[in-house]
Amino acid sequence: MRVRRFLVGVMALVLLLGIAVTPCAAAKTKVRVSTWWSFETGSPLDALKAAFEAAHPDIEIEYLQIPSSEYYTKVLTMIAGGTPPDVAMLGMDKLGSWVPRGALQELTPYIKEAGYDLNALFPAVRKAIEFRGGIYALPRDVTTSVVAYNKTLFDQAGVAYPKAGWTRQDFLRTARALTKVEGGRTTVFGYAFDTFADGFVDWLFTNGANFINAEANRDALHEPKAVEVLKFLQGMVKEGIAPSPSQAEAFKYASSAFAIQKTAMYVATVGWANSFAKDPNLNWDVAPMPVWAAGMEPACRLWVNFWTLPKGSTHPKEAFKVMAFFAGPEGQKIVGETRMGIPAIQSVAYGPAFLGLPGAPEHRQVFLDVMENAKPFPLFPESDQYFTVMRRELDQVWAGQRSVEEAVAAIDEQTRSLFNK
């Protein structure tokens, strides 16, 4: 009776003082998202997190930042150990090796349940998120490849700016005219390219070539069309139009040579374009990749960064909500506005979030114009080992230590066992 009287008295006091009595707030579901990007206040990831949590107050995003040098190894180890992140950021090239390992969940059931609109994506992006008949990723952001050119260096050399429909021979003549030698030393290269796979895959695509064959069961660099491309690139290095490996050491990356105006042309993604745009002293623009020969179809690389759902995710439904938001209209608008890349949704990319961005390049729409002919970066299970062999052998080609034919024969021989596992 005393306890009852006490409780009645407390309630009367609460009513008298007008104190509101509310139930305890429900605990939020925490979704862990692994990333090699930083997520400090004001970053693109921070903007995505803030927008998502405002729309989904019952879910909290926790970013798990892992250094890029150890990111893939650590995330795979976490998945194998049964403690994966709920969502994992993934570079496009890893999808082909992670799916066969069983590291990722197939997303079709989640897509149907959530009503995520795949048809809103660029058709090339829609194709890129598939592997072996399943959908294993949603797009984080997208890029195509274009030729970035230094307008100041073109003007100084009296060379006309490139335009759609130019050929590789036009490109070669242009690069020759832009190469500048003073006192026996090259001060400006006509063109510079990175010697890892990203640096020349666009050229392979322009000639209908690839790293691997159509059946994805053998190397394809030894095939005639690929050999033709590699000899074209090696020829520019031999001629001094493009820097040799020893000359390129001063730049580290070909993109750096373009940024400091030591090369007049560079095949760039939108990520590098956004970086170049920060320099007010760099007067530049973009043009489509050359066609390999007159009458041939244009082509370039499509690269997509992914959001994926690892096997064993603790909160898969909530995790997919995060992925679908990031890859949906609002998330992709943030992607464009914060310059993460090209929004994967067509209507967003053609709107102010991308085309309306201020600053260079003037012809930003070229990145979208080439989307129709963009080819997804090749995905295959043996890619990690393959590219290690490929780069080792081709480094000798760029250094002038062996012929293209010798190198591609060695690549084919050393990688056959990979495809026969």
Image (spheres, grey):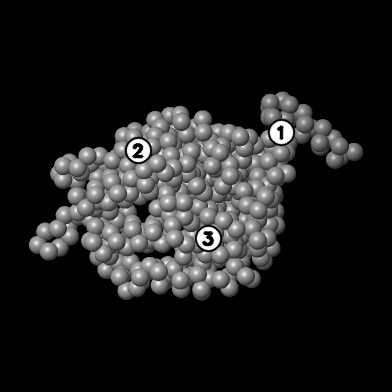
Characterize the local packing of mark 3: few (<14), some (14-19) or many (20 or more) Cα atoms within 10 angstroms: many
Q: Nearer the viewer, mark 2 or mark 1?
A: 2
Image quadrant containing the N terminus = top right
Name the residue at 38% across, 67% down.
Answer: 404
**The label number, if any, that marks residue 212 in the structure image:** 3
Characterize the local packing of mark 2: few (<14), some (14-19) or many (20 or more) Cα atoms within 10 angstroms: few
For the residues marked 1 and 3, what is the alpha-carbon distance in whole angstroms?
A: 63 Å
Q: Amino acid at mark 3?
A: Ile
Please give the residue where the numbered disc 2 appears in the rendered image: 164
Q: Secondary structure at mark 2?
A: loop
Residue 211 sits above or below residue 406 on the image: above
Q: Is residue 43 visible?
A: no
Name the residue at 53% across, 45% down.
Answer: 140
Q: Secondary structure at mark 3?
A: loop
Mark sitting earlier along the chain (2/1): 1
Name the residue at 73% across, 26% down.
Answer: 15
Mark sitting earlier along the chain (1/3): 1
For the residues marked 2 and 3, what is the alpha-carbon distance in whole angstroms?
A: 28 Å
Q: Residue 279 or 218: which is nearer the viewer?
A: 218
Please give the residue where the numbered disc 1 appears in the rendered image: 22
Left or right, 190 with reference to 255: left
- Quarter of the image for residue 81 reads bottom right
* x and y percentages locating residue 159 in the rendered image: 19, 42
Name the residue at 65% across, 44% down.
Answer: 320
Q: Secondary structure at mark 1?
A: loop
Q: Amino acid at mark 1?
A: Thr
Characterize the local packing of mark 1: few (<14), some (14-19) or many (20 or more) Cα atoms within 10 angstroms: few
Q: Is residue 377 visible?
A: yes
